[in-house]
Image (cartoon, rainbow, N blue to C red):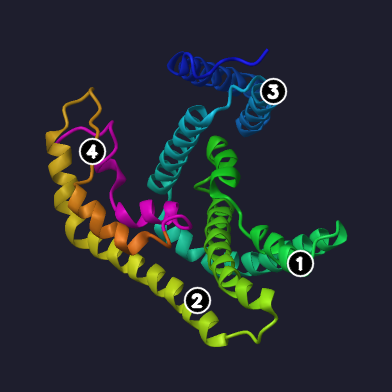
Amino acid sequence: MPVEASATPDALLVMLVGGATLLAVMARHVCGWLRIPPLVGYILIGLGLRLVGAPLEWLNTPVITAFELLAALGLVALLFRIGLESDPRRLLAKLPGASLIWAVSVITAGLAGYAGARWVGFDPLPAGVAGVALTATSIGVSIPPWQQAGALGSESGSVALDVAELDDISGVVLMAVLLSLIPVLQTGEAIAWGTVAGTTATLLTSLVAFAAACWLFAHWAEPPLARFLASRERPPAPMLVVVPPTLYGAMTLVTLVTCAATPSVVQVLLTRRPQLVQPSASPR
């Protein structure tokens, strides 16, 4: 019998979110006991909620919105922590080797995705979209096992982080270029290479501008801001820092295109001395 979600939406929402949180804690301990990444347990919980909730009509719009919000907040927190624990110099040192791995990964994944989509009967255009989508490596999926194993700061961990970042950036650029070409490809007209070049140049310019803004912030605004926040902190109570709306709005104009692809790079660039902004830091 379907559950009337509209009768008690708040109770249903609290029950599902609370239950999922409890299951996630249990899954983490069970996966640790089985020596497998907790991410496996989280995925199984999501699949279980989908299989059970869909027939019972539990997964209505408010519930799905709540889970999407929690997922976004969790991913932001995860990537922020990864950025704080990363060593920018080591990442830059490993970039040449990671670039070769990235190139092979993108080409192999793209061709395999396209061939697989064609094999199951997709037309060339949808198969191309599938191939491009498979070139991206989600940092939120690939990096947590390294972090939980304490190996993210190792040589191999730095290479893995570089490759994941490059994969995500190239995936966004390639998908944007492909989406700009889809209307032309559907009509059978000649490809407007000027449009392709313009789209690519816009994305790369946004990325460079965003990196430059982060560098300027790190070298001019971050030191006094970090000292101010450290002086205001009163351990052991943690302090929640909210970015002023004006600063947030100004940076958002630059990051609309690139922030989805480079979240962990942002955290590395914005913080040169992580110990000053961590909750456990003591004032000087």
Side of 213 where 101 appears, left or right: right
Mark 2–mark 3 Cα distance, whole angstroms, equals 44 Å
Residue shown at 58%/86% (left/top)? 192
Residue 71 percent coordinates (x, y): 49, 36
Tag 2's secondary structure? helix
Question: Where is mark 1, residue-wise?
Answer: 111
Instruction: Indicate which label's residue lies in the foreground, 2 or 3.
Output: 3
Instruction: Indicate which label's residue lies in the foreground, 4 or 3.
Output: 3
Q: Which disc is residue 174 wearing? A: none
Q: Which disc is residue 241 wearing? A: 4
The amino acid type, in three-letter code, at marker 4 is: Val
Residue 276 percent coordinates (x, y): 24, 42
Which quarter shows the N terminus?
top right
Which quarter shows the C terminus?
top left
Cβ atoms at labels 4 and 3 below 8 Å apart = no
Mark 1–mark 4 Cα distance, whole angstroms, equals 45 Å
Mark found first going from the N terminus, 1 or 2: 1
Whether residue 272 appears in magenta in the rendering, the answer is yes
Question: Where is mark 3, residue-wise?
Answer: 55
Question: Where is mark 2, residue-wise?
Answer: 200
> Which class describes the residues within 10 Å of circle 2: few (<14), some (14-19), or many (20+)?
some
> Which class describes the residues within 10 Å of circle 1: few (<14), some (14-19), or many (20+)?
some
The amino acid type, in three-letter code, at marker 3 is: Pro
Whether residue 100 appears in magenta in the rendering, the answer is no
Mark 1–mark 3 Cα distance, whole angstroms, equals 37 Å
Tag 3's secondary structure? helix
Q: Which residues are magenta?
A: 259-284
The amino acid type, in three-letter code, at marker 1 is: Leu
Cβ atoms at labels 1 and 4 below 8 Å apart = no
Residue shown at 48%/20% (left/top)? 13
